[in-house]
Structure formats: structure tokens, C-alpha cells
Amino acid sequence: EAIAAEKPLIVSQNKATQHHLYKGAILINNTKEEIVQAVSSIKNEYEKYQSEMKQLKEERLLQYKLELQELNCLIRGKE
């Protein structure tokens, strides 16, 4: 939802979030200090994180379009 809305995100750090949210998000280990620092970072550099999230959205849309084209080619090839 954050990607679709192009909104910066603070989220727990794990393998999935590292893979999927490499732009526009701050990945944290859920400590009080990291939460405070992440909120401050987004507050101070909101436009940067928002721009990165927009870039991530555009990358994902392109990726989905390419995958859909590939899938359509596979389906048509089996007809």
C-alpha cells in the first residue's frame, strides 16, 4: 500500500523487506532508538524518501508489465 500511495515507510528489517523495500523505506530492528531515528529521518528528508518510493513503484510496474508480457507469450505459445 505504501508503494502504491508513494508514501515513505518505516518497517521491520528482515530478508523479505530488504528484498522488496530497497528504496523509499527505512528498515529497522524495532528498538526505541531506531524508531525515533527513522521517524526523524523521514520527517527531515520526506521528499527524498517519497521520491524513492515513487521510483520503486515505477520499477515494480515495469517489472509486472514485463512479467505479464512473458506470461502472455507462454500462453499464446501453447495454443
Image (cartoon, rainbow, N blue to C red):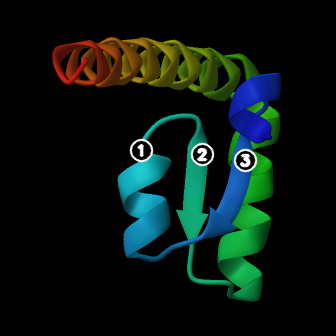
Mark 2: amino acid? Ala
Q: How many marks do you count on the picture?
A: 3
Q: Earlier in the sequence, mark 3 or mark 1?
A: 3
Q: Circle 2 sits in a helix, a strand or a loop, which is it?
A: strand
Q: Quadrant of residue 51?
A: top right
Residue sitting at 69 percent across and 32 percent down?
Answer: 3
CA separation in Å, label 2 and label 3? 5 Å
- 45 vs 12: above or below: above
Q: Which mark is residue 22?
A: 1
Query: Which residue is at a point 40% across and 19% down the rendered structure image?
Result: 68
Residue annotated with mark 3: 9
Q: Which mark is residue 76?
A: none
Image position, residue 17 (x, y; %)? 49, 62
Q: Residue furthest left?
A: 77
70 vs 52, left or right, is: left
Q: Is residue 54 left or right of residue 22?
A: right
Residue at 45% x, 50% y: name it.
Answer: 20
Dots 2, 1 in contact, CB < 8 A: yes
Q: Position of residue 52 (x, y in %)?
A: 54, 22
Q: Secondary structure at mark 1?
A: loop
Vertical position of residue 2 compared to residue 58: above or below: below
Q: Residue at x 63, y 28 (%)?
A: 49
